Image (spheres, rainbow, N blue to C red):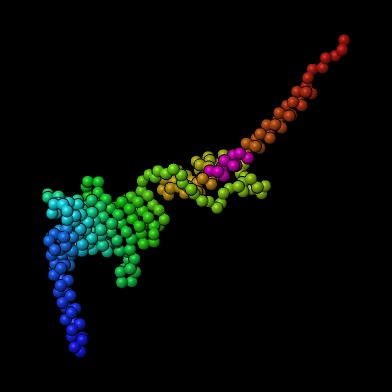
Amino acid sequence: MKKIYLLILSSLGLSSASNAQWQNQGIDLFTLNSGSVGIGTQIPSSYVHGGNNKVLEIFNPNTVLNSQSHLVLSTGSVLNGGSAGTLTWISKNSQASKAMAYIACYQEGDATTNASGGIAFATSDGGDLTHRMYIGKNGNVGIGPGTKNLSERLSVNGTIRAVEIKVENKNWPDYVFKDDYGRPSLKEIAVQIKNTGHLPGIPSAEEVKSKGVELGDMNARLLKKIEELTLYLIDKDKELDSLKERMNKIEANNKPRILAP
């Protein structure tokens, strides 16, 4: 019993000493009664990005007090539907403070039954913070506005510049050159173009505008048309050779004969 009593007293003593150590060490480490921790600042303050749910604020103690950029870790909500926490970069001087960027974990679904979430990245170009990229609960990545929680693995609202893009396709149209492939006649194609305004097997302008195109599928469709066109040209070349041969025979048979005197 005496050992247990001594252990409790020792624990209380360590807790008291630890509390005194954490409360105030100059401007290096400071805690509020709310539990927020400031490193390099005596007063961990509140910001719009984190509300009053700040957990940790880190300054550089080697510069002027509260007059430098710093990091803030908070559990404040920055997204519709709430967020589980944010890490924010703050630009601060003696006049004002400004959030430059943050990373936030946001909740998707009911936390009690479906605790899932994603990550949002935001930056500022001098104005308000704007969400630039998302990583959803399923690992899908969205870049640009309006790309949160989309079904594609990667969604980009904007242009992409790349040195090379590799697209895999398991249905490359080499079957066009097989003997059992049934090509429509040029007359049939002409009728369809007249009726629909586009080549058979190629999406219309309206469809492309509303749904876009899949690069792998469209490349395969275009290659199929090129291969069909090549076969049509081969057929026409054979017909032309046949016509030339017939014309040569006709000319040979119709040459004037010179009778001997």
Picture coordinates of residue 66 (x, y %)?
14, 54
Q: Residue furthest top?
A: 261
Q: Nearer the viewer, residue 15 or 74?
A: 15
Instruction: Inspect this view and state whether residue 125 appears.
Output: yes
Identify the residue at image location x=63%, y=40%. Answer: 231
In the displayed structure image, the side of residue 59 where residue 163 appears, left or right = right
Magenta-highlighted stretch: main secondary structure? helix
Image-quadrant location for residue 56? bottom left
Picture coordinates of residue 81 (x, y %)?
27, 62
Q: Is residue 28 magenta?
A: no
Identify the residue at image location x=23%, y=54%. Answer: 89
Picture coordinates of residue 194 (x, y %)?
53, 40
Instruction: Inspect this view and state whether residue 182 appears.
Output: no
Q: How many labels were placed on the picture?
A: 0
Identify the residue at image location x=16%, y=60%. Answer: 28
Image-quadrant location for residue 186? top right
Identify the residue at image location x=13%, y=54%. Answer: 65
Q: Nearer the viewer, residue 17 or 105?
A: 17
Q: Is residue 227 magenta?
A: yes
Picture coordinates of residue 258 (x, y %)?
83, 14
Q: Nearer the viewer, residue 196 or 28?
A: 28
Numbered range of the magenta stretch: 222-231
Q: Residue furthest right?
A: 261
Q: Residue furthest bottom?
A: 1
